[in-house]
Amino acid sequence: MEKEINNVDVIENLEDIRRRIEEAKKRAGRTDEVLLLAVTKTVDFDRIDKSIEDGVTDIGENKVQEILKRMDYYEDKINYHFIGSLQRNKVKDIIGKVKLIHSVDSLRLAKEIDKRAKNEEIIQDCLLQVNVSKEESKSGVYIEDLDDFVYNILQLDNIRIKGFMTMAPFDATDEELHKIFRTLKENFDKINKKYEVLDMEYLSMGMTGDFEIAIEEGANIVRVGSGIYGKRNY
């Protein structure tokens, strides 16, 4: 396993991922930017260093202690995204330090982020996590509750909704993936238009196994880990 990890060609993988992003955009007739968010969960610093040297500007972590380690190491060289399930008692550790919190999945969490941001006299940018497929193992609000969820969060002064995030089931077919991602894009457009105070710009959909379909359906942030860094260090 260690030899296999050491043999990962991060630069070659990045070239392949970027090519596939551009091809997916072309199929969808898109010319806008798609942010490649490198998911660095359990990845050693050497491989992350290589990706940053090759132009990666944003990394995502799903544990607070891990993202804090990355911040200590890289300081302000890159942008940090928190993409995992966030416990309310951990909000204080990352507030104001991350570009985006991708996983706001409850009003209680939103209120905690708002409270901590108010204490710091900042506005924290966040994405709302939506469980489009209603998969029991995943967090997130359901589509039918999304409008009310947005309305309630808009009553908070120090949290700013910058868009939506979703994860599709790992065993979904291509047809199911298209439907899931398309559904969220349609709701993104509808809700963005409904509320004048909203100026959402990010739709975080798609990971290593399905990011091309997500782009075809409107994603402008894709979260890719093993596709760049190879198998994880478990």
Image (cartoon, helix red, strand yellow):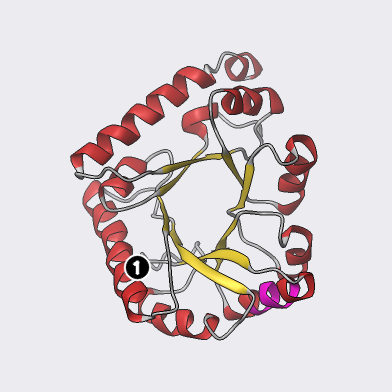
Rendered view: 224 above or below 137: above
Residue 147 lies in the magenta stretch:
no
**Where on the picture, by quarter, is residue 209?**
top left
Q: Is residue 222 above or below residue 163?
A: above
Label the magenta part by its dominant secondary structure: helix
Find disc 1 in the rendering and name its residue.
188
Task: Look at 19% across and 44% down and name the residue there.
Answer: 29
49 left or right of 141 in image: right
Q: Is residue 210 visible?
A: no
Residue 58 found in image quarter: top right
Residue 28 lies, with reference to residue 160, above or below; the image says: above
Q: Residue at point 32% right, 49% down?
A: 214
- Expressed as whole percent of the image width and height from the top left, the position of residue 35 reads 45, 43
Q: What range of the chain is rendered magenta?
A: 111-116
Q: Is residue 165 left or right of residue 87?
A: left
- Label 1 is placed on what type of residue? Phe
